[in-house]
Each structure stands twice: as structure tokens, then as C-alpha cells.
Image (cartoon, rainbow, N blue to C red):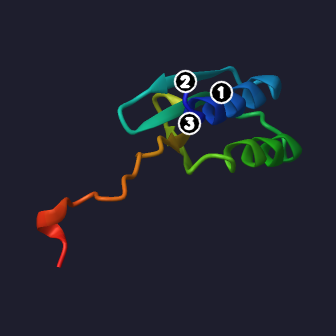
């Protein structure tokens, strides 16, 4: 599993341990984690949830009147670098 997957899995596990079952999804450039957030989350639990998603590259909360609240986190996949990215024709 790539490093992004390991980080995302750790975030998902931590959220699940806090009572927010999380789901992960692999994408081309990132791994995402989502969890439904109940209305009754205490301030202390919110603090722990925010500490968990702070390990991601980006995170947020999507709240709608139809679907409730969904916490999301994104861990970017590392793009390999090479010593000659542009090739000889791009060097000046």
C-alpha cells in the first residue's frame, strides 16, 4: 500500500475508534476518507476528530439539510520526481 494509503487508513481507523465509521476511496492523485458525523458529537469528541483529520493534506465538513454532515479528508499521493523532468530540450 502506498504511503498515502497508509496515512488515510490510519485516519480512517482513528475516526472509527472514535465512533465514526469511516470509508476510504482510492483516486488517481489522492486517497479520500469520509465519515458521517452525528448531531450529538460532544466538544471533546470534536477535538479528537479534528486531531485525526489534521493528519490529512486537506479536510472539511459537508453539511446539508438532506444528507446530514459528512466529514472528509484527503491524503495526496506522492508524485515521483526525476532528475531530468523536462528533458534536454527544456534546459536553458
Q: In which quarter of the image is residue 44?
A: top right
Quarter of the image for the C terminus: give it. bottom left
* Residue that label 3 marks: 4
Disc 1 from disc 2: Cα separation = 7 Å
Looking at the rendering, which quadrant does residue 35 occupy?
A: top right
Indicate the position of residue 82 as horizontal and vertical percent values: 36, 53
* Cβ–Cβ under 8 Å for marks 1 and 2: yes
Q: Residue 22 location in percent, x, y?
A: 64, 23
Residue topped by disc 2: 24
Measure the alpha-carbon separation of dots 3 and 1: 8 Å
Question: Counting residues from the N terminus, which is met first, the one under dot 3 or under dot 1?
Answer: 3
Quadrant position of residue 87: bottom left
Residue at x-position 39% and y-position 30%: 27
Q: What element carries label 3?
A: helix
Q: Is mark 2 on a helix, strand or loop?
A: strand
Q: Name the residue under label 1.
A: 9
Amino acid at each position: 500500500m502506498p504511503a498515502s494509503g497508509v496515512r488515510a487508513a490510519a485516519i480512517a481507523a482513528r475516526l472509527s475508534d472514535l465512533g465514526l465509521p469511516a470509508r476510504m476511496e482510492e483516486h488517481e492523485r489522492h486517497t479520500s476518507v469520509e465519515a458521517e458525523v452525528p448531531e450529538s458529537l460532544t466538544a471533546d469528541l470534536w477535538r479528537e476528530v479534528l486531531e485525526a483529520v489534521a493528519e490529512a493534506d486537506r479536510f472539511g465538513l459537508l453539511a446539508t439539510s438532506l444528507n446530514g454532515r459528512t466529514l472528509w479528508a484527503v491524503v495526496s499521493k506522492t508524485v515521483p520526481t526525476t532528475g531530468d523532468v523536462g528533458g534536454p530540450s527544456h534546459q536553458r
